[in-house]
Amino acid sequence: MDLNNIREWFTLEQIMDLIDRYQSFGPIPGFILPLLEAFLPFLPLFVFVLANVNAFGLWFGFILSWGGAVTGAFIIFLLVRNYGQRRMLSFLQRHGQVKKLMNWLDRHGFGPVFLLLCFPFTPSAVVNIVAGLSNISVTQYLLAVMTGKFVMILTISFIGYDVAALIEQPIRTAIVATVIFILWLGGKKVEARLNKQEMRERG
């Protein structure tokens, strides 16, 4: 398949047809796919959220995406907390960045998890695993993942709610691209700020 064929496939009609087919399977895949993304982080959560809100409407699609993502993240956290600490701790603690994040979560609890999960480009699988290895309480983690994922998935839902408008209105597409860039930049700034705070506390 050459580049021209790929471009021809990604027309408005093709994308809307794909969404219609997705909708015909009912809401179960809309919940399961975001849940699986917690276990398989290479899966495109952004695409799943976009498909959900276009297939099932803004709010129901958002609830499916948010519920699935939170459930998957919490399962990972519980598995690591209850079964994976001994096996993973010695390996992960040898990596400086992971150890730094663990120490940071131990000291600050809710705040770091919430901030990291607010941004769509944060490697949430790493956050979930490290949170499970840390001493953060189950209640703190669950509250942080519910609120952080709420902010992130609601933002994606509003951005991607109307696929047709994104394709037909270049100005809106440019605005969406700008918002995505701002979210990415914000995540990087939060990460840099927390790294500086870590260095100050060590000093």
Image (cartoon, rainbow, N blue to C red):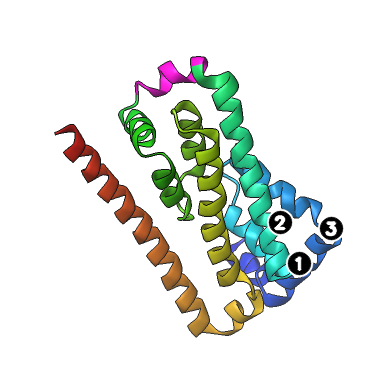
- 164 vs 90, nearest the viewer: 90
Q: Which residue shows up at 56% across the image and 57% down it?
A: 150
x and y percentages locating residue 13 in the rendered image: 73, 76
Type of amino acid under label 1: Phe
x and y percentages locating residue 167 in the rendered image: 60, 78
Q: Is residue 190 left or right of residue 198?
A: right
Q: Residues within 10 Å of mark 3 (few under 14, many from 20)?
A: few
> Which residue, given by chain and number where applicable, does mark 3 sit on?
26
Of labels 3 and 2, earlier in sequence is: 3
Residue 64's label in the rendered image is 2
Magenta portion: prevailing SS class: helix
Q: Residues within 10 Å of mark 1 (few under 14, many from 20)?
A: many
Q: Is residue 116 magenta?
A: no
- 201 vs 85, nearest the viewer: 201
Q: CA distance from mark 1 to mark 3?
A: 9 Å
Tag 3, which secondary structure? Answer: loop
Residue 56's label in the rendered image is 1
Q: Report which quarter residue 100 is drawn in.
A: top left
Type of amino acid under label 3: Gly
Tag 1, which secondary structure? Answer: helix
For the record, the magenta segment spans 86-94
